[in-house]
Amino acid sequence: MNYSISQNLHFLNIKVSYTVKTSNLLKLPLWRPGRYQVQNFAKNIRGMKAFRRKEELRVMTVGRNLWKVVGAEKGDNLTVTFEYYAQHKDAGGTWVSDDFWLINGIGCGVLPEGLEEEEIQLKIKYPKDFEVATNAKKKGGKYHFENFEDWTESPLMLGRHMHYKKFEMDKVNFHIWIHGKVQPDWTKLVDDFKKFTRVQLDIFGDFPHDEFHYLILVPDFKHYHGVEHHKNTVITLGPAVDFHSEVFYNNLLGVSCHELFHVWNIKQIRPIEMMPYNLFEEAYFDTGYVAEGVTTYFGDEILFRSKAFDTQQYIKELNTLLTRHFENLGRHQLSVADSSLELWLDGYEKGIPQRKTSIYVKGAIAALILDAKIKKKFAGEKSLDDVMRLMWTRFGKKGKGYTSSDYQKVAEEVYGEDLTQYFEEVIYGTKSLENQVKKALSVLGFKSDVHYNKQNDLQTKFGIKIDQNGKVTDVENIKSGITEGDKIIAINDIQGDSKQLIALTKGLDKIQISFEREHKLHKNELDKKNKLYFKKIYVTKWND
């Protein structure tokens, strides 16, 4: 099967030549690994045509990601052409500009049915001053892929502002490609990448491949995204003007460490529901707390352990994680396991108020609690490292998919005791985890305290958050009669801006709130409850 690609402004002209093997159907992936949500890549395609030699055949849409070449028969040599709108501006999309291209076969790679395992050759026509970063091998002017999955797992980053370095560790070549109008400090960058790479190799014992490529795209606008693949990761991080700032650099380390961990955890240690990938239908799984949660936890913890992050930076990352967890009231409604299953519904958008938790955030909190639990019992001689190492040898290395039950059994084997209560409360339940988090942080060497906004009684005493315009953004006091989207107009009949309204509640045990909902004015009286709202655990220091 042969692909050819050239640019037409914001579109790519794509041609696919092949021999019909089993049917006259063409299909396009419905989702991509790393984002478990229907992507509808087909909406970017226009003008699809098919030819048998010089004869044009009709192309009929028969599904949201499925076409039929009418009249095509087994053995026919066909050429299919179409334009692909390449403006999907994230690390998982296909995206072209005057200075660079990012091509992800997962979105623009149309597959003739029956040719899933056929070798693919790709010819790209691009500007002469572009360099190409990819793990795909080039022979005879064409890029070669073993099969369709290899094509979807081997993106290409092209451009005229490419920077490159590599290093070797444990006989693995790690390639760092950065595209952007920037000047990397390679000495510092490579040194820090080596630090977190060393720890990860030590955790798992070996690497699944003989090479790995970081494809880092630095656009001129603000962006933050990373996508894992077998032999590479694509990272989009901007704006370029901030490249040398401390925040940008720490974000780069954070996402890079996270994505490298994914090479083992999700690309190899994979839920049974995705073994193998079925890119053309939804793949529901309940172990997102392992795939993303454990990875999120280790992403920052490894940077701290390797000394790529100092203590203050790691505390900052921990507090960001804790804030995101405790400020998400959906954690009381849907477990992290159920939230994983429901990623396909609204996992990557805000959704309705207080509906779900985050597999990334609560999954990381769950990993922190389990890591501390194991370390406490074995005085630091065992940890979550041992769980993931066993997952690698039992499942990842053998190409065997795992279930939530499998993960629990491995964790119990490492811990040496039953962990049913942990899984029922933390993974399958919606119980508040404040006490467990405080205990875990203490075991891991951190002092923590309960933090709440002492300057905002409307929030902490009456359970209502408002933005700068007085609009209600969150409500923990569910009996208040106030809901997200209401606009606070006055407190005790005194009007004011957001700061004034908050100030008017200070020190009061009872207030009258005037608010607007659907263009109607309402008034509610609220009494202060014997509790504090929107409180969270906050790390104060580390006991070195």
Image (spheres, rainbow, N blue to C red):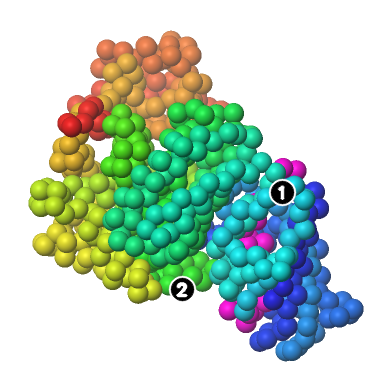
Left-right relation of 246 to 460? right
Percent position (x, y) of residue 241? Answer: 59, 28
Q: Is residue 79 magenta?
A: no
Mark sitting earlier along the chain (1/2): 1
Residue 276: which disc? 2
Alpha-carbon neighbours of circle 1 within 10 Å: few (<14), some, or many (≥20)? some
Percent position (x, y) of residue 438? Answer: 18, 37
Between residues 447 and 231, which one lies in front from this camera angle?
Answer: 231
Left-right relation of 294 to 50? left
Q: Is residue 214 above or below residue 437?
A: below
SS category of the residue bearing label 2:
loop
Q: Quadrant of residue 318?
A: top left
Percent position (x, y) of residue 213? Answer: 51, 54
Alpha-carbon neighbours of circle 2 within 10 Å: few (<14), some, or many (≥20)? few
- Bounds of the magenta segment: 98-117
Q: Real-space Cα distance between discs 1 and 2?
A: 35 Å
